[in-house]
Amino acid sequence: MNPAIHPVDIVRVGDATWTDVQDVAATEEPLEIRLGGQPFVVIMRTPGADRHLAAGFLLSEQLIQRASDVSTMRYCADSDGQDSENVLNVWLQGESSVRVQAALASRRHVTANSACGVCGRRSIDDLLEGSHRIDSPLTVSRRVIEMLPVALRSVQRTFAETGGLHAAALFDASGELAGTAEDVGRHNAVDKVIGAALGRGEVPLSNHVLFVSGRTSFEIVQKAVVAGLPIIAAVSAPSSLAIELAREANVTLLGFVRGHTFNIYSVPARITG
């Protein structure tokens, strides 16, 4: 099977039907890059072309300048001798090896682009640290879910002018807007809207819905869990790891919220007909 695709069981909400079906999600898994055996960065990615990803990342971080700076790339081996395909060890040579030692010594934070808010984590275990189950009794009607895209678009002022920003918003159970933020990065918009709620003394957000304008990745679910949000909805698809974390954390995760239809990937009991 294509490693970039992950099968998932969902509830598909149509105009007049709720149907249990099997769907697919884009695979999202962490890749830990180690430099000379030392943890350096964790990048959330779709499996495949990991060596190219690592080389491009190290180039963008100015740790290498040419292909010959890379001596070896090899997946780490598990205790049973099998390759651990989410841990890639890279050895550099020449001046690049000197730059790497300086970078590791200073423990600097590496650049995180607008699609990857967890870059810079030191190990894969760090990704799940602090996660917990959300026990909120909040329920929301499908009518409220259906109106979220229109409500969000109506307050995307900068997007209306530029077409180039993501947005995140908080709503209460009745669909009333409780906060909104825009940013070039989805995770940045989520951080902004949660941070504003924190400043107002509203965290944990156990009686709110988070709605985002794009897809839902692991990092967005993780941020929502930490903030105590029981329901996350999005215009586009969630990744496989986002679905997995939502199920583990007892979070209701919705995707493809468009018009009168959407998919429920976890904890459907919080959505009423």
Image (tube, rainbow, N blue to C red):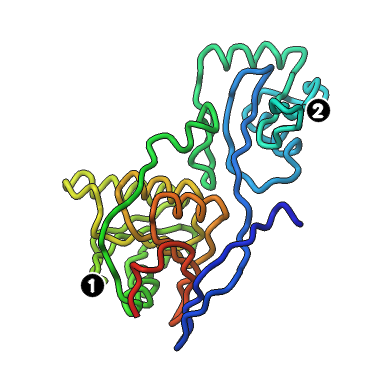
Q: Secondary structure at mark 1?
A: loop
Q: Nearer the viewer, residue 139 or 183?
A: 139
Q: In percent of the image, x 52 and y 68: which residue is there?
A: 10
Q: Position of residue 247 (x, y in %)?
A: 45, 54
Residue 138 relative to residue 255: left or right: left
Q: In the rendered image, which quarter contains the C terminus?
A: bottom left
Q: In percent of the image, x 57 and y 54: which residue is there?
A: 240
Few, some or many residues within 10 Å of mark 2 (<14, 14–19, 20+): few
Say what amino acid the circle numbered 1 marks.
Ser
Q: Nearer the viewer, residue 243 or 133?
A: 133
Residue 99, by quadrant, is: top right
Q: Secondary structure at mark 2?
A: helix
Residue 174, by quadrant, is: bottom left
Q: Position of residue 207 (x, y in %)?
A: 23, 59
Q: Find disc 1 in the rendering and name its residue.
A: 174
Q: In percent of the image, x 81 and y 28: which residue is there?
A: 67
Label 2 vs 1, first from the N-terminus: 2
Say what amino acid the circle numbered 2 marks.
Ala
